[in-house]
Image (spheres, rainbow, N blue to C red):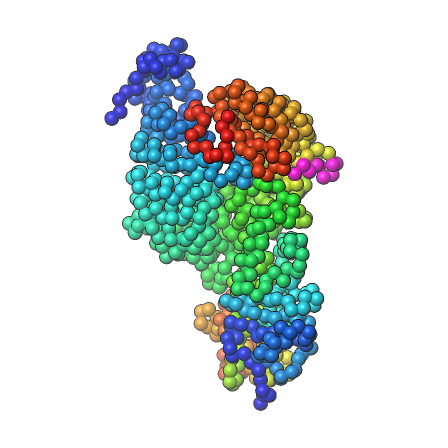
Amino acid sequence: MRALPELMDPKRARESPESAVLSRPSAFPDEVLERILSLLDTHKDRSSASLVSKAWYHAERWSRARVFIGNCYSVSAEILVRRFPNIRSVTLKGKPRFSDFNLVPQNWGADIHSWLLVFAEHYPSLEELRLKRMTVTDQSLEFLALKFPNFKSLSLLSCDGFSTDGLSAIATHCRNLTELDIQENGIDDISGNWLNCFPDNFTSLEVLNFASLNSEVNFDSLERLVTRCNLLRILKVNKTITLDQLQRLLVRAPWLTELGTGSFIQELTPRQYADLETSFKGCRNLQTLSGLSEATALYLPALYPACANLTFLNLSYAALQSEELARLLAYCAHLRRLWVLDTVEDKGLEAVGQNCPLLEELRVFPSDPFDEEIVHGVTELGFLAVSYGCRKLRYVLYFCRQMTNAAVATIVRNCPDFTHFRLCIMNPGQPDYLTREPMDEAFGAVVKNCPKLQRLAVSGLLTDLTFEYIGTFAKNLETLSVAFAGSSDLGMQCVLEGCPKLRKLEIRDCPFGNKALLSGLEKYESMRSLWMSACKITMNGCRLLARKMPRLNVEVMKDEESNDGQSYKVYVYRSVAGPRRDAPPFVLTL
Amino acid sequence: MTPPLEHDYIGFSEASPMGRASGVDEDPASLNLRETELRLGLPGSQSHDRSKPTLAGVSIFGKDLEFSLSPSKNSAAPVSGAKRGFSDAINGGKGVGGLFSPRSGESSVNAHQSAASNSKPLSKEGFGASPQTKTLQEKKSQAEAPATKAQVVGWPPIRSFRKNTMATNLAKNNDDTETKSEHGCLYIKVSLDGAPYLRKVDLKTYSNYAELSRALEKMFSCFTIGQCAANGLSGQDGLTENCLKDILHGSEYVLTYEDKDGDWMLVGDVPWEMFTDSCRRLRIMKSSEAIGLAPRAMEKCKSRD
């Protein structure tokens, strides 16, 4: 058993600012305090609790089992294990978000392996690892599989560096695995043989998501796996799984709560279709449905019986037309989250507004983002239609080719509860297409009408006025993404001075220079990170920042895409671990 | 009985007859193909329906590819779908129909291709064994590299995974548009009672019973299916089932099919899509043998008259 934490450690007394005020021993025995604090779930609550007093700090750190690290370079593994001795679950995010869009070169860092080495020594009972934008090699996956006998849950989102061989290692060695969740990673998809590596006596799987892998898996293996894992509640297969194969899986696992189908386009005989329909009817617990790649109108009706309890429908890889969507949505009255492609067009979004009054989240992705000749997709009208019918909307991601200030103003009047407003007008710097004015008033309306706004992404032709509005009204804003916007340093300054809760600021291709950068000196320490690329920053500005703020890591990369050779990508973040030791040659830490 | 018939015993199911083009001779390639072509009909005879498309067909891995030998004549070909089975020779290129309804994105995809490749979409397919890969690569390169347009790196902000997946789907849809089939063709055997050999037809190239019956009639015309074939085939969809029965009414033959359950059914009862889904083979049965079926057929015809 572990020893009681030392409350009167003089070293710790010096570290904690509360020690002068509350240095008396706690009224509760530590075990009781720990037990109480162990009921705290969210990281924010736990962080708050740890600041109350030294007693609470120690009770919290001993009782914490799950840790979330939003920037893997803000803290080191050594510091982590020293503070939290009993961690079972680690969530790590690595690269800056713009790495998703190829703005960060390969081999930038965020490699999990050094963390795993430390965890093997200090967290041998580690059960869960959730990684986002980290580099994970096959060697790391094998290490993970072999060194952590209690390992249960692996989630990899938008990661890179591994192949399906690494998944084989996981399947082979993790006897207690409950979750394998592989999403949208840039990996080497060698073969589907990894699925065969689950031993015959392996039955613990509850979550299996391999929807984003392309290579074909052995269906017999999959069917046997699904049959013997009777706790399976989330199954998302890839598009090599055909409809009749899906039907056989559904028969084995009708109690699924989340289903990702494979390809929805196979030719079915009437009998096969009837079987499929029956199987979907048997899925009474479905809350989430996704996949449906290459769906045709012909077989979508088979789904209808399964949609009664759906709360999340992800059609973002299914190029549905407006009528197909409308007919499907008629069965999805309880929908809270909907992701679609813009192939459904405004008419499809009208159907959303008509059928889904409980909708809280809508994401509309572009089906052909690089073709400017297209006159399809969605416009401001679709967004408007949704806002009239779905008053509870709070999360929107909307890719479109035209928008007006008036439409956005109406939308946020209809839906004042927005917490996440991400509007992407795909042509950079495009004005209101009716008035030809900048889109300043649109985002002004957003921040004025939506006091709960936490996340904002702006686009279109924008002047400094947009940022004045943001700085003045967006008092709860935590994340801001800006591209091809602004007129001068003033814009960025307004945001840095006006948004007290700002944590993440990412900017590209804006006319913000050193003055703007340096206006946020103290601010950056209260933020997670700042990213600026293709702006007007110079090396001197970055050096000045680094000199004035030693507790920030200021990392500079040369911007290869720029023409003048003077442009830099700057990544600024707070860290208690000091400058990182694994920076590649093209990253200069000032 | 029959004049010397040319027919394709050599894997008719695998390959469409080469060069079922009509009388356009300027392209030496097409000439060579026609030399070796085995087709139905008297040597040198050409029906008026063959006048239009000058397409050479190659079927590889069960999937029909088309490439244009004389592009100037092919305004209709790419849009209507290039997968012509044997019926193309019969139906004059109108064999394709509404089974695959072009999506609204199709024209834009074609426009995209034209913009990118500056040539007719059809010409992309070439002779290679994997046109899909080629198209896919082109699509992918357009998705990733700002070669053809002034694309900004990392804009619009979409994850690479999604970009690549959509590029793949676009390529696939595009191929679907041109080949008209997501899963190859649907060749089934057609037998005629008393004929010395069987034929094969691709059900995917028809959109209703009328077209099928026309094709079959022409295919087996030498065996005289019936004079009333010439009547009442106006092609109205609502009358397809009736037309078929009208053909057979009074003729000595009944058209039947074997479905996936192994049962022999009368053609024309179910909607066309359901028929193509379940049909495994066709049999043109002598009325005298179709004792169970034919009387019903005749009764139905009578009741509709």
Is residue B178 rendered magenta in the image?
A: no
* Residue lying at 55% horizontally and 21% vertically, measured from the top left: A544
Judge whether residue B251 can be spotted in this image: no
Q: Would residue A87 be found to the left or right of residue B193 on screen? A: left
Q: Looking at this rendering, what residue extends furthest in the left direction?
A: A1
Depicted A34 relative to depicted A292: above or below:
above
In terms of depth relative to the viewer, which is nearer, A260 or B141?
A: B141
Is residue A430 rendered magenta in the image?
A: yes
Judge whether residue B133 can be spotted in this image: yes
Q: Looking at this rendering, what residue extends furthest in the bottom direction?
A: B1
Q: Position of residue A454 (x, y in %)?
A: 55, 29
* Residue lying at 39% horizontally and 56% vertically, measured from the top left: A219
Depicted A471 relative to depicted A317: above or below:
above
Q: Position of residue A532 (x, y in %)?
A: 57, 31
Q: For the magenta stretch, what is the residue range?
A: A428-436
Q: Position of residue A379 (x, y in %)?
A: 66, 43
* Residue lying at 69% horizontally and 64% vertically, measured from the top left: B75
* Residue lying at 56% horizontally and 51% vertically, measured from the top left: B140
Q: Hey, which quadrant is residue A206 in on the image?
A: top left
Q: Main secondary structure of the magenta part?
A: loop
In terms of depth relative to the viewer, which is nearer, A572 or A561?
A: A561
Q: Position of residue B226 (x, y in %)?
A: 61, 83
Q: Would residue A250 be found to the left or right of residue B40 on screen? A: left
